[in-house]
Image: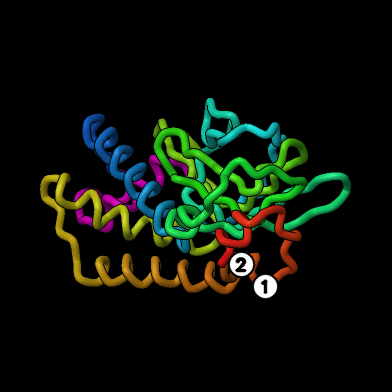
Amino acid sequence: MTVQDLIEAAARECGVITFGQALNTVEYANCILSLNALLGQFSVEGLTVYFVVRDTFALTGAASYTFGVGGTFNTARPEKIRGAAVINSGGSMPADVVGPERWSHILDRTVTGAFADMLTCDYAFPLANVYLWPNPTAGTLELFSVKPMAQVAALTDVVVYPPGYERALKFNLAVAIAPELAGSKLSDVTVSEAKESKAALAGINAMALGAPVPPAGNRPQNPPQNEDIEQAEA
């Protein structure tokens, strides 16, 4: 399916065109913007994204690492990091992915080690910042994250998705573009299909992807290196 096929299918749901008819240039351009906005919305909602990406990055002991295109970790910025581990000297140890509240309890952030007990990310845009504690001076960081769904640029772009996605995108795009297309008549059935198809994707992905990696509190911790570490973990 091309982007044009998807847009025209959505436009037919709005009653603007029938099979064999087309939109005008301005309408196609506006529909591409709406489609990209919809893909972005699906991305930030997490469960409508159908895959978790595994990345590995070299660790250098830096105080923090930028994550995103052009950053230290030069790949797509994550919407959410779901799991992390440090690989060093042939061994691997998971790191607990924590929020700012828990991270703020660390008293001595200069501590280094072979592995990290905790990782936090501020999800800044366009480059997120990743912090590790204790801070490994070498090794490899393994991350599992939800990445944004790819944006489209032209009507001829080919979009390929797992089963169920074309239906969800068609009906949800129809709802998104209806206010912008003259003469659109959005039916209650189309609105209902948009909600149900999106909910179905979330349900399938919840079963397929599972819950986030269990917290590091369920695994053996590295021996405390000083009193600050003990206080931070209290």
Compared to residue 187, the image places residue 158 above or below, namely above
Is residue 146 visible in the rendered image? The answer is: no
Write down the region rendered in magenta: 1-20
- Quadrant into which the C terminus falls: bottom right
* Label 2 packing within 10 angstroms: few (<14), some (14-19), many (20+): some
Tell me residue 228's x, y (percent).
60, 54
Identify the residue under disc 1: 218
Closer to us: 227 or 146: 227
Is residue 188 visible in the rendered image? The answer is: yes
Q: Tell me if 142 is positioned left or right of 107 in this view.
A: right
Q: For the residues marked 2 and 1, what is the alpha-carbon distance in whole angstroms?
A: 6 Å
Identify the residue under disc 2: 215
Compared to residue 167, the image places residue 211 above or below, namely below
Secondary structure found at label 2: loop
Q: Quadrant of residue 219?
A: bottom right
Residue sitting at x 43%, y 37%? 152
What amino acid is at disc 1? Asn
Closer to us: 125 or 122: 122
Q: Which mark is residue 2?
A: none
Please say whether residue 155 is one of the residues in the magenta stretch: no
